[in-house]
Image: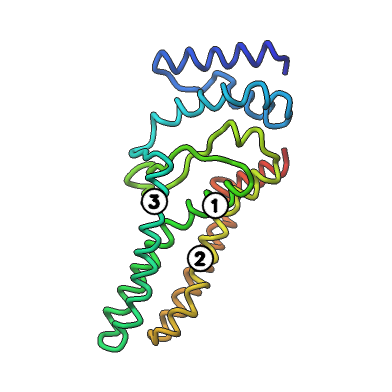
Amino acid sequence: MERQDIESILAAAEERLAAGGSLAGTGFRRVVREVKADPELARDHADRIARIDDAAFRRWPMLVVPIVPGTILALVAAAVGLGLVAWSYRLADGSQVAAVVAFFAGFGVLAATTHGLGHLVVGRLLGIRFTAWYVASPGRPQPGVKIDYASYLRSTRARRAWMHASGAIVTKVLPFALIGAARAAGLPGWVTWALVGIGFVMIVTDVMFSTRKSDWSRVIRELRS
């Protein structure tokens, strides 16, 4: 793709957004693919592409929180999740039901928060920045992190792939990592098997669906680009 073509497509995308439209049909995604594959193009166009991408992004999530307060909230929530898991140790001496409820509540909070934190931590270590946390909709309540597209485009495909994979890996490891905590807390044996089952269901779901949509599809896309 010639540079003048890139410029004209980006200008058309900016005009479309300014008029209240979407990026569909502008060729913007085709430009993104071209720029990702060429470090020189990324150097020249990444900042402009990032501004367009951010303007389009902010139209659709139900909630957007700036990256610093959002990260603080995510860390606090993760700490609450760990606290609930720890609390189940004390509750197990009195009520097994209360202990199990606290344990799985903690697991749920950790599952909701560590996915985005995994992307954030690995991405930052690899030089990819982020601009915000967001919640897409009531039907998709798991918090996500918005990539700073300029740093993303200037990164390598391997680093982009690892960043995309990190959240999914953390989520799949979590139920297995909590097996030891469940056993140490003296929770019923079925809790251990439930964690194993949840972990395997997550893995199967990823194999069946995420390779075509979501994190693993992006990993495959980057490795093939």
Give the residue drawn at x 56%, y 51%: 210
| Rendered-image quadrant of the N terminus | top right
Q: What amino acid type is highlighted by mark number 3? A: Ile
Q: Reply above or below: 195 against 144.
A: below
Q: Left or right of 200: which side holds 153?
A: right
User: Foreground: 202 or 62?
Assistant: 62
User: Foreground: 113 or 31?
Assistant: 113
Q: Reply above or below: 122 against 37.
A: below
Give the residue drawn at x 65%, y 46%: 161
Q: Quadrant of residue 47?
A: top right
In three-dimensional space, the C-alpha distance between marks 3 and 1, rounded to whole angstroms, equals 13 Å
Q: Position of residue 185 (x, y in %)?
A: 40, 84
Q: Left or right of 109: which side holds 36?
A: right
Q: Position of residue 214 (x, y in %)?
A: 54, 46
| Rendered-image quadrant of the C terminus | top right
In primary-sequence order, the first of circles 3 and 2 is: 3
In three-dimensional space, the C-alpha distance between marks 3 and 2, rounded to whole angstroms, equals 30 Å
As drawn, the label of residue 72 is 3
Q: Mark 3 and 2 residues: CB-CB less than 8 Å, in contact?
A: no
Q: Residues within 10 Å of mark 1 (few under 14, many from 20)?
A: some
